[in-house]
Amino acid sequence: MLRPTGTTAFDAVASCVSLIVYLGVAVAVLARRPHQAYARVFFVVALTSAAPYVLTLLEWWKGTGVYSPASIALVSAAFCVGSAALFHFTQVFPWRRPWIRAHGRWLIAAYVLPLLPIAVAAWVVGGLMMAMQSDQGSGGLGAVSAGLSDALVILVGLPFLLLIGVVLPLAGVLSLVKSWREAKNASNEPARQATFWMLISQLAGGVLAILVLPMLGLAGVPPLWSTIFGGFAYAFALVMPIALLTARIDGDAPASTPQLPNSATPN
């Protein structure tokens, strides 16, 4: 919703490359290690990430008419599943963490509960955005407001948006940090390197994509700088699948890795 209007050729090419890399790595890792939980979960992450990449390609190809309430709801639903899957991945890579051993059933709720509220709220918001654009294009003041039912739908979706957009990503980063520390303490170099680069990918790429790029568009920064920062965001996002593809992980925690006590906080 905060992204700058219009999709450039650079966005289309970068989205195409990202789509190919994510799906290619997911298929390769799944074929190589079909019995590993993290390989199956990352395949889900790749599938859900395909939705926004494909939509960006379609927007560049067709120009207009791609973003509709239905397409926005579809991408939002994919974001819900992808956010839960990404947290799930950090709980099973490079090995199963104590939290998922003790509270793995909560993941079912994380996958299922936000899906419908977020999709419906995104549909409503998408309809309001289209109405505003239509009103502005017809010479009006763009004074389109939500009715009571629409406002209630959006309010109901806000807690779930907080869960999938803030809580789960932060919990996933913390899980990667703890896995990195355990791998370092256990002198497990393959696991340490893989989790380190995944942390770089999530922190740098996430900050650029979620915070920096939308602010550049709102602030009216020249397109050249937006393209440069966008290139960094795409590049950092590709670090994670590449780190997974090159990792030499068997999926089991080494015997010397300290096991933290179980708690309700993701470990």
Image (cartoon, rainbow, N blue to C red):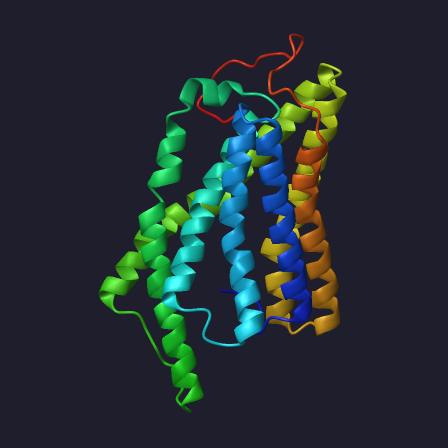
Which residue in the rendered view is the most extreme toward the top? 255
Residue at the (37%, 52%) spot, across then down: 158
The image shows residue 218 at horizontal and vertical percentages of 59, 70
In this rendering, is residue 165 above or below 86? below
Query: Relative to the observer, which residue lies in front, 168 or 22?
Result: 22
In this rendering, is residue 4 above or below 20? below
Q: Is residue 31 left or right of residue 231?
A: left
The image shows residue 148 at horizontal and vertical percentages of 23, 65
Q: Is residue 265 left or right of residue 5?
A: left
Q: Is residue 118 left or right of residue 22?
A: left
Q: Quadrant of the C terminus?
A: top right
Residue at the (47%, 49%) spot, across then down: 79
The image shows residue 266 at horizontal and vertical percentages of 50, 27
Query: Relative to the observer, which residue lies in front, 217 or 255?
Result: 255
Residue at the (70%, 43%) spot, across then down: 239
Q: Is residue 206 left or right of residue 131?
A: right
Quadrant of the image occupied by residue 233: bottom right
Residue at the (72%, 36%) spot, across then down: 197
Residue 48 visible: yes
Residue 167 visible: no
The image shows residue 206 at horizontal and vertical percentages of 62, 48
Quadrant of the image occupied by residue 6: bottom right
Which residue in the rendered view is the most extreme toward the left? 149
Which residue in the rendered view is the most extreme toward the bottom? 139
In this rendering, is residue 207 above or below 124? above
